[in-house]
Amino acid sequence: MTEQKINDANNPKSILVETRFGDIEFVWERALYMPVGLLGFADQHVFGLANIPGKSLDQFKLYQSLTDADLSFIVAPYNMESGIYSNTDIERAGQSLAIPQEDMAILLIVTVRPTGDNQNFTMSVNLQAPVILNTTRQIAWQHIMPHDKYPVQHDI
């Protein structure tokens, strides 16, 4: 699939996906194209980003495959002012992906794990392999940070 096919006239204007949070409509022209896919899901290239219904999850988004309704991820938009990533590492990631800083957004994939009883859970984000977006071109890559100072499971 090429970047051009996402905006092809044969594609629907929107797609309704039955997600674990209910039916969510994604506008096809706002889809994000991942040339390489995600780690472990290299054959999935087109994703939508949506707010998760309900107030309790408003700091998270749903990163939903638009070609496989069963594949979705909870993601947390990264706050560039948080200082979790060094400015140098963000700049290097942008350079390696040819994304100008003003067009860059970062999504952190969230993992939710039960604590043992059915009432509680813990959450972490993957700082080692964030999804980096070019917001202007609507292209995304899962970028592996070049060193291990960023953990795969950073508790939130």
Image (cartoon, rainbow, N blue to C red):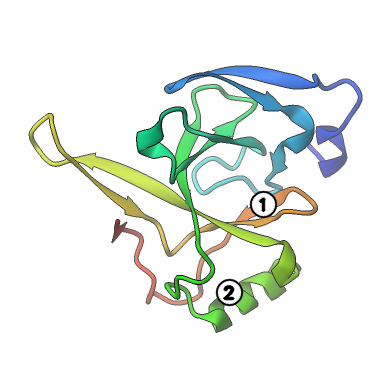
User: Which image quarter is the C terminus in?
Assistant: bottom left
Q: Position of residue 24 (x, y in %)?
A: 57, 21
Element marked by disc 2? helix
Q: Residue furthest front?
A: 55
Above-or-below relation of 116 to 79: above
Q: Earlier in the sequence, mark 2 or mark 1?
A: 2
Q: Position of residue 30 (x, y in %)?
A: 74, 37
Q: CA distance from mark 2 to mark 1?
A: 15 Å
Element marked by disc 1? strand
The residue that appears at 39% across and 71% down in the rendered structure is: 150
Q: Residues within 10 Å of mark 2 (few under 14, many from 20)?
A: some
Q: Amino acid at mark 1?
A: Ala
Q: Position of residue 38 (x, y in %)?
A: 55, 46
The residue that appears at 66% across and 52% down in the rendered structure is: 140
Q: Position of residue 3 (x, y in %)?
A: 82, 43
Q: Image check: 37 left or right of 128? A: right
Q: Which residue is mark 2?
A: 90
Q: Residue furthest bottom?
A: 88
User: Which image quarter is the N terminus in?
Assistant: top right
Q: Amino acid at mark 2?
A: Ile
Q: Which residue is mark 1?
A: 140
Above-or-below relation of 29 to 83: above
